[in-house]
Image (cartoon, rainbow, N blue to C red):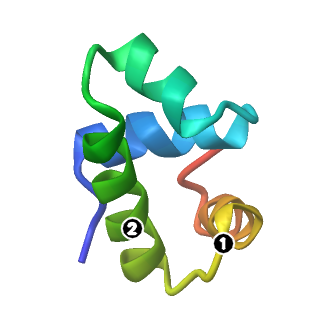
Amino acid sequence: EPLSERELEVLTLLASGRTNAEIAKELFVAVGTVKSHVNSIYRKLDAANRAEAVTRAREMRLLS
């Protein structure tokens, strides 16, 4: 299942080292919404944590 545009935005911010709270503030959404996106990213990329998600995304060329 491909990542949505919003999930890609969240993933890019994750890769830059931002916290959920920082991502929420930047995207003007609730922290809970960010957590939901992060969990969806983990599921779609079959990742257990942020580092694994970013590594897999880079392998899949979703991130530069």
Q: Determine the secondary structure under disc 1.
A: loop
Label 1 vs 2, first from the N-terminus: 2
Image quarter where the C terminus lies is top right
Q: Report the front residue among 39 and 15.
A: 39
Between marks 1 and 2, how big is the CA–CA gap?
9 Å
Dot 2: few (<14), some (14–19), or many (≥20) neighbours within 10 Å? some
Q: Report the front residue among 31 and 46.
A: 31
Tell me where residue 15 appears, x and y as whole percent: 69, 42
Image quarter where the N terminus lies is bottom left
Q: Residue at x 40, y 25 (%)?
A: 24
In this rendering, the answer to whether 2 lies above or below 8 is: below
Question: Which label was assigned to residue 17?
Answer: none
Q: Residue at x 67, y 30 (%)?
A: 18
Q: Circle 2 is placed at which residue position?
A: 39
In the displayed structure, does residue 55 sit left or right of residue 19? right
Question: Of the residues shown, which amino acid type is indicated by label 2?
Answer: Asn
Q: Residue at x 33, y 47 (%)?
A: 7
Tell me where residue 59 appears, x and y as whole percent: 70, 69
In the displayed structure, does residue 30 sit left or right of residue 61? left
Q: Determine the secondary structure under disc 2.
A: helix
In contact (CB < 8 Å): disc 1 and disc 2: no
Q: Residue at x 62, y 42 (%)?
A: 14
Answer whether residue 53 is visible to the viewer in this image: yes
Tell me where residue 62 appears, x and y as whole percent: 53, 53
Tell me where residue 56 appears, x and y as whole percent: 66, 72
Q: Circle 1 is placed at which residue position?
A: 49
In this rendering, the answer to whether 24 lies above or below 48 is: above
Question: Of the residues shown, which amino acid type is indicated by label 1?
Answer: Asn
In this rendering, the answer to whether 32 lies above or below 23 is: below
In the displayed structure, does residue 2 sit left or right of residue 18? left
User: In which quarter of the view is residue 51 placed?
Assistant: bottom right
Dot 1: few (<14), some (14–19), or many (≥20) neighbours within 10 Å? few
